[in-house]
Image (tube, rainbow, N blue to C red):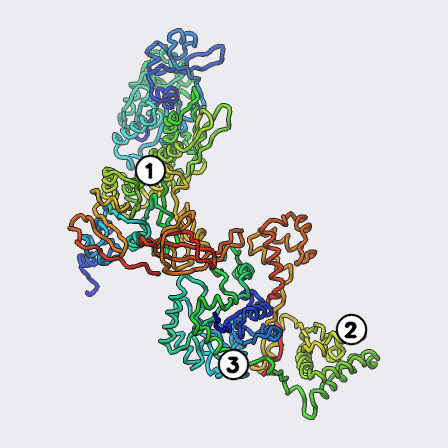
């Protein structure tokens, strides 16, 4: 029996905070294993995961489709898929608009925001349990000829009936129907971790989270055989046709830094050198040491080589503003420990005094952009934000949420709580975690703290904590970066 | 003087509450949920303040679905419903989906003798809207007691029995026989009217 | 008439006899130290054989061997006094135990509530009969007059204008004076109270202690403050048996009396009781405690007894019973069963709470339950038995059967699949992980059944419910 080809068009990764329970690597590994032709990563109102997804896709040889899932504030749930560069830009814009319209950590996208979307974005309508035909009509008007009705079946009592009714609805609305998986993790076994995450997200225990849990583990990357048993072949085939259209790759992207930082008559390279020299005279009134001089030269050469001048100029610009306003700021991160950063006033540590290894600043081999974190005085952070928005324009600046990893301590705390342990037990588990390597939980430590390491509940806590930690998903922290236009 | 409305008219329209509703159970029809069946019955539904018998060939023929609308309405009005000695656990999610207000439902488990005692207590108490029971080989006298208790307590009594009981007479005011292949219900007896000559088809099983 | 006195002429004996099943056997109460035991009081049957108070025990035993000898218990008598005061408190907020063997209660205000005095009096007598205390009742303008008139009268009602006449006719010997005072008056030739009242006050004041004149003044209506009874907030009563009671049925009578006393007590407080304990004491074992709880406060003696008896039916006592007591620490205010404003209840109507109480008492707590849905995907955990009423939660799934088998059984019937599978995979966190595919099938008999197989399998099927 030959199985239909399939591309999954609706899949969350761990970057959908506490919703997706698998990381991109796991998802693509599984997609390759079950022979998917492509896999869309459609984290909710976020593109945070696409770099990892891109790497994983490259590694596993399964094509990545970039997309994002949205629950419109006044409309349907949709998945938008990127066809080309225009589509990608439009999606970035939508996410920025939606994130900016809401509190940190959430978003708000309205129908009014979704106007004039380019042809480079495709839409999948994900109808609710009781489909609202008006949603479908509206969406297909906004995305003419590029809107589908996604049929997502997860072994409910009447999948056949639902499929039949949704197909009929699609026909009525003049839409094409397509199969999708609403995938939340890569394999069935990830169900437990997902239940834990769900409980954490809703601040309750797994046992009490019934209303939020999924009834089964069907929201994983199912084998094509399993899919064939659920969906008619034409719905599966349609996934490939859509995937075919989505040929955009992250490789096409290049970051363009703001130009206005460089005065006429200067190139970014000469201007950065100018500022650095100026700074060096301020930092080392008697002239930099031999070591510092060498460092500066070496760094400037590397920066020029990698085309990162504008990046440093941007950072310098923001720091200069803050200092002029008397706003306390402090650069940190590995890149900040550089002679150039010291000279530019980004950091306060003279690199020649601490023997910093330059290679930890930026590395040609790793081909990673430099990373400079600047902490601003909390109460006056907003002034800095306003400056950035005004100087670079709202359309060119964005607040990004950085996903940090779950540290063992907070992970065990959340997991233990979700599994219903008492507050004092949660505290005890967290406190012994300093000495506890998650991969090899020390039974002796647990015993010492009064736990039975063989008790099923403790075994569940340690196993889930280990899994959660490996996801490297975590809490939001705010960071400011000028954004590509 | 458009605001002046004759009191009689208000009463007739039941827009004001008279406090003392005329004979509570009989004041409103208690439809069975099967319009064709209601049409064939003198009270357009279950006989008020009486015992009704539902005879079934086997469990799971839709016999309870005949009661859902009535149970939903009674419980919505705050009237308790007691389920005595059911053959299986009444499964709360299903009863909830059927619109029954679960906080008004009480389930009583008892052996045959005590079940009859409990049914009679409940019916007679006037505290119940409806009482469902599954007696084992009840005597004619026992059923008569339930019929009297239903009248005394103005309650709807439902007795579920196997279909072989159809051969014996019963003091119940209404006797229905639920049959399979195809699903249909036959009225064996209804006080105040002649039973309709034909059985009435019941809808096939469908998801809500 | 503002005060009534209820005199208990056979208080001690009634206090004992009311705790025993009715019997014609002679009964005598004994008191005094071991070397000088005397009869304290006797019942009618014993009196008929010549027994009387102050007879030595030897003398009494010489008169009859067929007699129940009971130790006089002053504390038991005090408990009875408290009970009666609590009972009277149900009729009047001014009740006093200032007099021995009698209680007085203010009735002037109560008549408005309980009808004219003759009706009121009849009601008091009926309830006292039920309580098992013989009594005399007299009503008068003040408590002292009522008390004193009750010494010789029963059923007398005196208004203020007739008071001095009625008091005056009383023999001095019946006026309630101490014996030496009575004797002194008699020696002075004063035989009736009117003579005493006519005598010069200075003379009486000189010859007698001051309380004698105070007494006379009080009889005539000079206001003297009375110490009023205040009802306690808990109830506790105990009955001890001469012989160990071995059969549950033997406990019925004492239980009825105790529960009756409890009802009397809470009714008098215009309250109810929602929880009480019946404690059965054994000789060599720890007491058996029977907790009796109800959904709503209750004060009807019969209903309380109904509940208690049904509980008793289900109780297995580990040893014969020596004594039984009832303790009620938690006495909530009484809330009458609610009903529609104009609703007519037929005879014997009960509130639903009362009905449920009756069912629970007879069938057992676990056999009577409510139901509610619960948020769990595992079908067997998607519902709960409820003891108390609760708001139902929303159901999780669309298609669930009206009937569920508590223990699924192998499903062998020939069938065709109507719907499914519905996959349920849930419960890993409590060690009861379930992985099943549910199908709705129709059997050849026409039944619509709910069956499941292991996740991903098409059989064998287990029967889990019926769509009825």
What kind of element bears circle 3?
loop
What kind of element bears circle 2?
loop
Up-down: is A118 above or below C354?
Answer: below
Quarter in which the C terminus of chain A is drawn: bottom right
Q: Please tell me which residue lies in front, A427 or C156.
A: A427
Q: Would residue A242 be seen by someone viewing this image from the given angle?
A: yes
Measure how far apart labels 1 and 2 are at the Cα level.
88 Å
Point out residue C440 in the picture as x, y percentages from the top left corner: 38, 57
- Callout 3 environment at 10 Å: few (<14), some (14 to 19), or many (20+)? many
Check the residue under mark 3 and report the chain it is in: A
Kindly identify which residue carries mark 2.
A356
- Callout 2 environment at 10 Å: few (<14), some (14 to 19), or many (20+)? some
Residue A397, quarter of picture: bottom right
Q: Nearer the viewer, mark 3 or mark 1?
A: 3
Q: Are marks 3 and 2 on the same chain?
A: yes
Point out residue A99 in the picture as x, y percentages from the top left corner: 53, 74
Q: Earlier in the sequence, mark 3 or mark 2?
A: 3
Q: Would residue C220 be seen by someone viewing this image from the given angle?
A: no
Q: Are marks 3 and 1 on the same chain?
A: no
Kindly identify which residue carries mark 3.
A83
- Callout 1 environment at 10 Å: few (<14), some (14 to 19), or many (20+)? some
Check the residue under mark 2 and report the chain it is in: A
Residue A357, quarter of picture: bottom right
Q: Which residue is pictured at 33% across the width and 60% down the height?
A: B206
Up-down: is A82 above or below C421?
Answer: below
What kind of element bears circle 1?
helix
Kindly identify which residue carries mark 1.
B114
Check the residue under mark 1 and report the chain it is in: B
Q: Residue furthest front?
A: A1
Point out residue C169 in the picture as x, y percentages from the top left corner: 29, 18
């Amino acid at each position: 029996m030959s199985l239909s080809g399939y591309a999954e068009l609706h899949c969350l990764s761990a970057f959908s905070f506490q919703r997706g329970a698998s990381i991109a690597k796991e998802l693509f590994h599984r997609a390759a294993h079950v022979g998917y032709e492509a896999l869309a990563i459609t984290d909710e109102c976020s593109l945070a995961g696409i770099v990892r997804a891109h790497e994983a896709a490259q590694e596993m040889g399964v094509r990545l489709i970039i997309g994002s899932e949205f629950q419109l504030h006044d409309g349907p749930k949709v998945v938008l898929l990127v066809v080309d560069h225009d589509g990608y830009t439009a999606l970035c814009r939508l996410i920025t608009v939606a994130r900016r319209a809401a509190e940190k950590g959430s978003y708000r996208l309205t129908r009014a925001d979704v106007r004039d979307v380019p042809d480079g974005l495709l839409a999948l309508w994900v109808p609710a349990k009781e489909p609202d035909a008006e949603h479908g009509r509206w969406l297909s008007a906004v995305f003419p000829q590029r809107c589908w009705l996604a049929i997502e079946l997860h072994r409910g009592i009447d999948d056949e009936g639902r499929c039949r009714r949704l197909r009929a609805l699609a026909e009525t609305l003049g839409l094409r129907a397509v199969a999708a998986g609403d995938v939340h993790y890569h394999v069935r076994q990830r169900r437990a971790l997902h239940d834990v995450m769900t409980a954490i997200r809703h601040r309750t225990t797994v046992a009490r989270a019934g209303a939020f849990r999924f009834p089964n583990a069907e929201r994983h990357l199912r084998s094509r055989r399993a899919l064939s048993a659920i969906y008619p072949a034409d719905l599966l085939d349609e996934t490939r046709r859509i995937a075919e259209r989505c040929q955009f790759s992250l490789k096409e992207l290049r970051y363009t830094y703001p130009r206005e930082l460089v005065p006429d008559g200067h190139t970014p390279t000469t201007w950065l050198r100018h500022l650095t020299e100026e700074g060096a005279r301020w930092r080392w009134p008697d002239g930099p040491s031999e070591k510092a001089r060498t460092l500066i030269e070496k760094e400037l050469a590397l920066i020029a080589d990698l085309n990162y001048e504008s990046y440093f100029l941007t950072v310098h610009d923001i720091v200069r503003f803050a200092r002029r306003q008397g706003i306390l700021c402090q650069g940190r991160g590995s890149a900040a420990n550089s002679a150039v950063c010291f000279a530019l006033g980004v950091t306060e540590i003279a690199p020649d005094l601490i023997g910093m290894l330059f290679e930890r600043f930026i590395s040609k081999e790793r081909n990673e952009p430099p990373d400079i974190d600047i902490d601003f005085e909390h109460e006056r952070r907003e002034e800095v934000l306003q400056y950035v928005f005004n100087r670079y324009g709202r359309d060119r600046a964005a607040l990004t949420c950085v996903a940090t990893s779950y540290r063992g301590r907070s992970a065990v705390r959340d997991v233990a709580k979700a599994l219903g342990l008492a507050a004092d037990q949660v505290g005890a588990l967290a406190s012994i975690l300093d000495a506890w390597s998650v991969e090899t939980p020390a039974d002796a430590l647990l015993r010492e703290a009064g736990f039975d390491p063989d008790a099923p509940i403790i075994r569940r806590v340690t196993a889930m904590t280990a899994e959660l930690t490996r996801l490297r998903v975590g809490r939001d922290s705010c960071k400011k970066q000028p954004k590509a236009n | 003087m458009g605001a002046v409305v004759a009191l009689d008219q208000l009463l007739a329209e039941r827009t004001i509450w008279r406090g003392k509703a005329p004979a509570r159970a009989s004041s409103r029809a208690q439809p069975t949920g099967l319009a064709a069946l209601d049409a064939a019955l003198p009270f357009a539904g279950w006989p008020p303040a009486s015992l009704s018998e539902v005879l079934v060939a086997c469990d799971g023929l839709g016999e309870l679905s005949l009661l859902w609308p009535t149970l939903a309405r009674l419980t919505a009005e705050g009237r308790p419903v007691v389920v005595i000695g059911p053959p299986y656990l009444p499964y709360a999610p299903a009863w909830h989906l059927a619109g029954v207000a679960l906080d008004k439902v009480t389930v009583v488990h008892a052996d045959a003798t005590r079940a009859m005692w409990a049914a009679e207590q409940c019916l007679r108490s006037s505290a119940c809207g409806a009482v469902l029971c599954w007696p084992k080989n009840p005597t004619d006298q026992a059923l008569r007691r339930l019929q009297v208790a239903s009248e005394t307590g103005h309650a709807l009594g439902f007795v579920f029995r196997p279909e072989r009981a159809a051969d014996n007479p019963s003091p119940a005011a209404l006797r229905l026989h639920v049959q399979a292949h195809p699903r249909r219900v036959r009225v064996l007896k209804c006080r105040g009217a002649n039973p309709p000559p034909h059985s009435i088809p019941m809808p096939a099983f469908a998801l809500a | 008439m503002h005060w009534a006195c209820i005199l208990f002429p056979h208080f001690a004996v009634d206090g004992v006899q009311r705790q025993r099943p009715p019997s014609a056997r002679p009964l005598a109460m004994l008191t005094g130290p071991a070397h000088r035991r005397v009869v304290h009081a006797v019942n009618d049957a014993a009196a008929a054989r010549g027994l009387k108070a102050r007879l030595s025990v030897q003398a009494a035993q010489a008169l009859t061997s067929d007699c129940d000898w009971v130790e006089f218990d002053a504390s038991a008598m005090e408990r009875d006094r408290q009970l009666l005061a609590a009972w009277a408190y149900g009729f009047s907020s001014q009740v006093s135990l200032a007099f021995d063997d009698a209680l007085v209660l203010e009735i002037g205000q109560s008549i408005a509530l309980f009808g004219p005095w003759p009706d009121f009096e009849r009601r008091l007598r009926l309830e006292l009969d039920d309580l098992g205390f013989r009594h005399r009742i007299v009503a008068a303008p003040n408590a002292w007059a009522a008390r004193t008139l009750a010494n010789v009268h029963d059923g007398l009602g005196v208004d203020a204008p007739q008071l001095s006449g009625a008091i005056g006719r009383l023999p001095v010997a019946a006026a309630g004076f101490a014996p030496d005072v009575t004797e002194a008056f008699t020696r002075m030739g004063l035989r009736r109270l009117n003579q005493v009242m006519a005598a010069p006050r200075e003379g009486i004041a000189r010859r007698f202690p001051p309380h004698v004149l105070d007494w006379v003044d009080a009889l005539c209506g000079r206001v003297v403050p009375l110490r009023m009874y205040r009802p306690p907030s808990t109830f506790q009563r105990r009955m001890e048996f001469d012989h160990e009671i071995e059969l549950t049925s033997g406990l019925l009578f004492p239980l009825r009396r105790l529960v009756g006393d409890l009802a009397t007590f809470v009714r008098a407080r215009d309250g109810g009781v929602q929880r009480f304990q019946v404690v059965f004491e054994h000789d060599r074992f720890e007491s058996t405690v029977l907790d009796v709880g109800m959904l709503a406060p209750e004060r009807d003696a019969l209903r309380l007894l109904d509940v208690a008896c049904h509980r008793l039916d289900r109780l297995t006592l580990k040893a014969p019973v020596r004594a039984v007591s009832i303790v009620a620490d938690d006495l909530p205010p009484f809330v009458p069963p609610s009903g529609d404003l104009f609703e007519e209840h037929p005879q014997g109507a009960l509130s639903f709470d009362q009905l449920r109480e009756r069912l629970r008492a007879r069938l057992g707590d676990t056999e009577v339950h409510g139901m509610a849905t619960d948020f769990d995907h595992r079908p067997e955990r998607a519902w709960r038995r409820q003891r108390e009423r609760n708001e139902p939660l929303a159901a999780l799934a669309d298609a669930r059967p009206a009937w569920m088998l508590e223990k699924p059984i192998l499903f062998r019937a020939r069938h065709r699949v109507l719907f499914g599978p519905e996959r349920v995979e849930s419960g890993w966190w409590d060690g009861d992980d379930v992985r099943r595919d549910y199908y709705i099938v129709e059997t050849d008999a026409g039944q619509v059944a709910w069956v499941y197989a292991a996740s991903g399998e098409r059989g064998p099927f287990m029967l889990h419910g019926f769509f009825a």
